[in-house]
Amino acid sequence: MTLWQKKISIQSDKDSLVFTVSVEDANPKRAQEIVNKITETYQKDLPKLVSNNKVIILEPANLPLEPTSPNIIINTMIAFVLGIIGNILLVSLIYLFRNVIEGESDLEELSLKFIGDIPLIK
């Protein structure tokens, strides 16, 4: 499947002869021009291919009032949830794999003897 085949979508109902043509593109004006060119070509060429068929464009392509993607609210919520899960996993892994002796209790768990402290000099 080429890039343009992924961007262009032509849909119709099962028992209807009405087709809906849509194009996803970063430039809405270009998407509108592509849809209009597809429908004009279809309107011009179909009567030559199939006899007794007349093609009528019900509604020309119009520019969208707002972008269809990306959905900022959903993307923000997904990033928030993944950020929380990632932080919990990171902290858990750091705690699980830490190998630092922090006091006498850690030595007792390892069955080692405590010899003495090194004082903190300021």
Image (tube, rainbow, N blue to C red):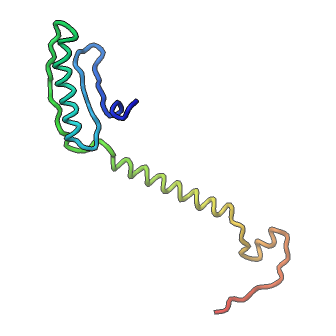
Farthest bottom residue in view? 122
Farthest top residue in view? 51
| Along the viewing direction, whichever of 12 and 91 lies nearer the viewer | 12
**Residue name at image x 18 percent, y 7 percent:** 51
Q: Quadrant of residue 116?
A: bottom right
| Residue 98 on image: x %, y % | 68, 65
**Residue name at image x 74 percent, y 76 percent:** 103
Q: Quadrant of residue 17?
A: top left
| Along the viewing direction, whichever of 56 and 79 lies nearer the viewer | 56
Quadrant of the rendering where the N terminus is positioned: top left
Q: In which quarter of the image is residue 24?
A: top left
State left or right for residue 88 relative to residue 33: right
| Residue 61 on image: x %, y % | 17, 32
State left or right for residue 77 relative to residue 92: left
Q: How many labels does the image show?
A: 0
| Residue 74 on image: x %, y % | 37, 47
| Residue 101 on image: x %, y % | 74, 73
| Along the viewing direction, whichever of 26 and 107 lies nearer the viewer | 26
Quick check: 14 above or below 83? Answer: above
Quadrant of the rendering where the C terminus is positioned: bottom right
**Residue name at image x 85 percent, y 73 percent:** 112
| Along the viewing direction, whichever of 19 and 79 lies nearer the viewer | 19
**Residue name at image x 34 percent, y 30 percent:** 5
Quick check: 12 above or below 25? Answer: above
Quick check: 55 above or below 72? Answer: above
